[in-house]
């Protein structure tokens, strides 16, 4: 196990839990229950993304209460600190690779949202798998659209270096996911559920 990853994730999880409690104290909302009741890591992260979105939208942020506004401003950095364990941004190594990626995405109806203007693609690690040098992507993030990404069916080829980098990303992500779920289980045993 990578102790550094575990420690980093545990610290972010503790901070996020603290912020959720502070928010619930000054302005009770649906988010503590939504996040606490999540059974799997994907459900948990979806709840965290919903909280992040709400903290930056009318649902939570647009209030005259300075305490709510203050907590909302602190939520985004906490959620952003978790992003490397749930998302990865890939850049093509050549124009030819970029063209191959776009050609593979062309039949997909949401393909226009898959790639950014610099030809990069931001994938959801929870919804992706790596087999050799083939990356199977089922969710992408874009600079446009909703807060939890777009569902997509896309297989893209990676070069050797990209495949190695993605293996490392998936390994760290699995450690992070396990750390989060173990912390939640431990809190359950102690009689309280961390958000």
Image (cartoon, grey):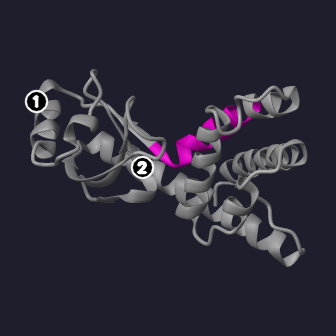
Among the 4 quarters of the image, the one containing residue 39: bottom right
Q: Return the residue found at the far top.
A: 118
Residue at point 84%, 49% (across, down):
24
Task: Decide: few, some or many residues near mark 2? Use Cα within 10 Å; few <14, some 14-19, many ≥20.
Answer: many
Residue for point 35% across, 44% down:
140
Q: How dense is the environment of label 1, judged by Cα within 10 Å: few (below 14), some, or many (20 and up)? A: few
The residue carrying mark 1 is 96
Q: Examine the rendered structure and indicate whether residue 94 appears above or below residue 59.
A: above
Q: Position of residue 88 (x, y in %)?
A: 43, 41
Quarter of the image that includes the C terminus: bottom right
How far apart marks 2 and 1 lie (CA) works out to: 24 Å
Which percent across, then down, holds residue 131?
28, 61
Q: Position of residue 29 (x, y in %)?
A: 76, 51
For residue 86, side relative to residue 189 (left or right): left
Who is closer to the viewer here, 58 or 179? 58
Q: Quadrant of residue 96?
A: top left
Mark 2 or 1: in front is 2
Q: Which residues are magenta?
A: 74-87
């Amino acid at each position: 196990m990578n102790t550094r990853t575990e420690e980093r994730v545990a610290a972010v999880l503790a901070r996020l839990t603290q912020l959720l409690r502070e928010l619930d104290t000054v302005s009770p909302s649906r988010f503590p229950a939504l996040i606490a009741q999540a059974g799997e890591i994907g459900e948990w992260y979806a709840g965290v993304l919903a909280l992040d979105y709400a903290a930056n939208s009318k649902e939570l942020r647009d209030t005259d209460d300075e305490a709510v506004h203050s907590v909302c401003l602190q939520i985004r950095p906490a959620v952003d600190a978790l992003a490397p364990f749930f998302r990865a941004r890939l850049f093509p190594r050549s124009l030819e690779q970029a063209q191959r990626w776009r050609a593979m995405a062309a039949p997909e109806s949401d393909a226009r949202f898959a790639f950014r203007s610099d030809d990069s693609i931001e994938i959801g690690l929870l919804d992706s798998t790596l087999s050799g040098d083939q990356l199977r992507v089922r969710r992408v993030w874009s600079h446009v659209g909703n807060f939890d990404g777009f569902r997509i069916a896309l297989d893209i080829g990676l070069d050797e270096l990209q495949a190695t980098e993605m293996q490392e990303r998936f390994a760290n992500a699995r450690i992070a996911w396990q750390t989060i779920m173990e912390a939640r289980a431990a809190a359950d045993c102690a009689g309280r559920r961390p958000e």
